Every structure is written in C-alpha cells, then in structure tokens.
Image (cartoon, rainbow, N blue to C red):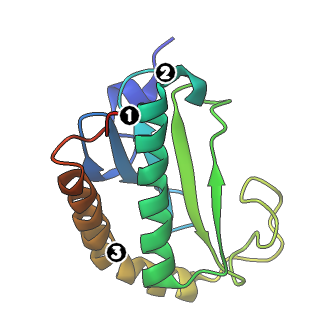
C-alpha cells in the first residue's frame, strides 16, 4: 500500500519541522481545515514516545490557538481518525455556525447549503493566519532550545 502522507505533504504546507508538519487541507466547504502530520510513517499516537506525543500535541495546541485568535470560530474540532489513511495525523478544523454541517461533524450529512460568501471571506484571511502559525511554531521550537522534542 502506498501512503499519500509519505509521498506528499497532504495539502498546502504551512510549516515543516524535523518530526512533523502542518498543512492546510483542501476540503470543500471548510477553508480553515488544518492537519498536523507526523513525518515518519506511524499509524497510531501510541507508537510515539512520550516526548514525541508531547511535541505533537503542542503543535496541535498551537494550531488551535492561532485559529481561535485569528478567526474566532464557534468551535474547533480535533480528530485523529486514520481510517482512510493510516498515517498519524490530527485534523484541526475551525467550525462556524454558518458552515454547511454545523453543529454536526464535517463527515456527517450537510445541515444546510454552503455559504460561499462566508467561505470566501474566511479564505481571504488564511494567508495571514498561515504566516502567524508558521511564526508561532518556529518560536515554539526556538523556546525548546532549537530541539523540537524536549527531553524528559
């Protein structure tokens, strides 16, 4: 089996570190859909060491915080499914009361039609958000003394 997350970034690359990367996914109807992808091919979160798990969740936390600060979403959804692509990655999705599926999960049936004006307005804000996300992830690495994974 060929793993798409081993072969490609899996979306628009926002930041890449030694152990993980953050991408913005191209998911129609959900412009603020990000993924934190572990670079090495592992299937489960428990495959990581304690320090690696901490590093991964720190990155997920930074993505969530930046989404909240820049977009003020109604909710941020976090998920690590891996049923379709068994390569460790976390979905970090800014959700809004106007999105087509809210309050249901994005994988459920749509609750209403898509609001293209809202989606377009949100999409215009993403380059600045991506820049801030990149800066915050770089700062987190710098605060750890240049090492992405703090040693216990």
Q: Position of residue 38 (x, y in %)?
A: 41, 34
At which x and y percent is residue 50? 49, 30
Task: Decide which of tag 1 and tag 2 comes sooner along the chain.
Answer: 2
Task: Please give the name of the residue rendered at 51% of the width and 39% of the height, measured from the top-left corner.
Answer: 89
Q: Mark number for residue 42?
A: 2
Q: Which is nearer the eye, 85 or 42?
A: 42
Q: Which mark is residue 152?
A: 1
Q: Quadrant of residue 114?
A: bottom right
Viewer-nearest residue: 122 or 91: 91
Q: Quadrant of residue 5?
A: top left
Q: Is residue 120 visible?
A: no
Question: Could you tell me which quadrant the C terminus lies in?
Answer: top left
Residue density around tag 2, few if under 14, some if 14–19, many if 20 or more, within 10 Å:
some
Mark 3 surroundings within 10 Å by alpha-carbon count, few (fewer than 14), some (14 through 19), many (20 or more): many
Relative vertical location of residue 30 with respect to residue 4 in this rendering, above or below: below
Q: Relative to 130, is 69 on the left or the right?
A: right
Residue 85 horizontal/vertical position (percent): 57, 29
129 over 84 or under it: above or below: below
Q: Give the side of residue 30 with respect to residue 130, left or right.
A: right
Between disc 1 and disc 2, the foreground one is 1
Q: Residue at x 63, y 55 (%)?
A: 78
Separation (CA) of disc 1 from disc 2: 21 Å
Q: Secondary structure at mark 1?
A: loop
Residue at mark 3 to residue at mark 1: CA–CA distance: 31 Å
Whether residue 4 can be seen here: yes
Q: Is residue 60 above or below residue 152?
A: below
- Dot 2 and dot 3 residues touching (CB under 8 Å): no
Give the residue at the far front of this rendering.
Answer: 152
Q: Secondary structure at mark 2?
A: loop
Reading the chain from its start, which is encountered first: label 2 or label 3?
A: 2
Q: Residues within 10 Å of mark 1 (few under 14, many from 20)?
A: few
Question: Which residue in the protein does label 3 denote?
Answer: 129
């Amino acid at each position: 089996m060929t793993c798409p997350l081993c072969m490609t970034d899996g979306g628009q690359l926002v930041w890449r570190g030694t152990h993980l990367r953050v991408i913005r996914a191209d998911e129609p109807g959900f412009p603020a859909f990000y993924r934190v992808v572990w670079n090495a091919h592992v299937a489960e979160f428990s495959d990581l060491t304690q320090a690696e798990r901490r590093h991964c969740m720190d990155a997920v936390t930074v993505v969530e915080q930046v989404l909240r600060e820049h977009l003020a979403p109604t909710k941020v959804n976090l998920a690590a499914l891996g049923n379709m692509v068994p390569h460790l990655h976390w979905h970090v999705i800014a959700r809004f009361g106007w999105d087509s599926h809210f309050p249901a999960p994005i994988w459920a049936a749509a609750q209403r039609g898509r609001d293209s004006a809202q989606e377009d307005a949100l999409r215009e804000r993403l380059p600045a958000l991506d820049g801030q996300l990149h800066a915050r992830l770089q700062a987190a690495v710098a605060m750890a003394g240049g090492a992405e994974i703090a040693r216990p």
